[in-house]
Amino acid sequence: MPKTILVVDDDEEIVKLITKSLRYEQFVIISACSGKEALSALEENHIDFIVLDIVMPDMDGFDVCRCIRKSYNVPILFLSARDQDIDKIVGLEIGADDYMTKPFSIQELASRIKAHFRKMDRLFKEWDELSPSSEKADAPLILNDKTFEVFLHSRKLDLSTKEFQILSILMCHPNQVLSREQIYEKVWGDEYGEINTVTVHIKNIRKKLGPDHNFIKTIWGIGYKYTEREQ
């Protein structure tokens, strides 16, 4: 089945450029020129990936991302003229999976999107082979790799795609220390990005788990490990 990508930007020429390029790559494209249109399109269609501008007239991309993360785990790539580090950090912390700045290479954008789907295919194969300890019926944290849902004491957690992937990898290797480099390679693979994003995503996962559920331990100077023992 071809993947469906939602392109959200108030610049009509940019939307046309992205649409033409991604259709050439055999993606189905749905476009929106505002945040409200984007949210409506997401409600009415099955979306596999979102390319999202930040500066738009009615709702900015950050607000759109926050709204999406309340109900959906669909991966989001910010495509914005705002190139300050703080914008990238904010984008990642509120649930985006990637960030590109304008002016941009349409070939790089297509490559990042294709790399994401390749990585997901590899992860699904790994999940079929591994059986995380979180699948125990009496475990406090339950991860469903088929529906991309995570439950903490029966309460559903809203994780972004990258957050879900990181948590899944850690849970598939309980009590094993994984370095930031190992986590980055497993989650981002041949995608573009910075290794510091691992730290940002771990911080977000811990915040969503809450201070009473210290499942992810920091091993200073080495990396992180997952343990079901609560402290």
Image (cartoon, rainbow, N blue to C red):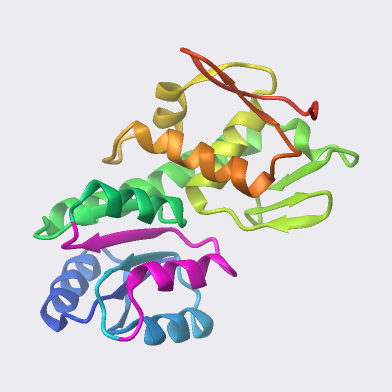
Quadrant containing the N terminus is bottom left
Q: Nearer the viewer, residue 120 or 157?
A: 157
Quadrant containing the C terminus is top right
With respect to residue 66, does 42 lie above or below? below
Report whether 163 appears left or right of 119. Answer: right
Where residue 172 sits, quadrant-wise, is top right
Q: Nearer the viewer, residue 115 or 134?
A: 134
Residue at 14% across, 74% down = 14
Q: Position of residue 215 (x, y in %)?
A: 70, 31
Report whether 139 appears left or right of 162. Answer: right
Residue at 83% across, 49% down = 153
Magenta region: 58-82
Residue that protrudes farthest toward the top in the picture: 221
Residue at 90% across, 39% down = 138
Report whether 108 appears left or right of 231. Answer: left
With respect to residue 38, does 161 lie above or below? above
Q: Position of residue 96 (x, y in %)?
A: 41, 56
Q: Nearer the viewer, residue 183 or 65?
A: 65
Residue at 73% across, 58% down = 156
Q: Position of residue 123 (x, y in %)?
A: 52, 39
State the count of labels. 0
Residue 146 lies in the magenta stretch: no
Q: Position of residue 46 (x, y in %)?
A: 50, 74
Residue that protrudes farthest toward the right in the picture: 138
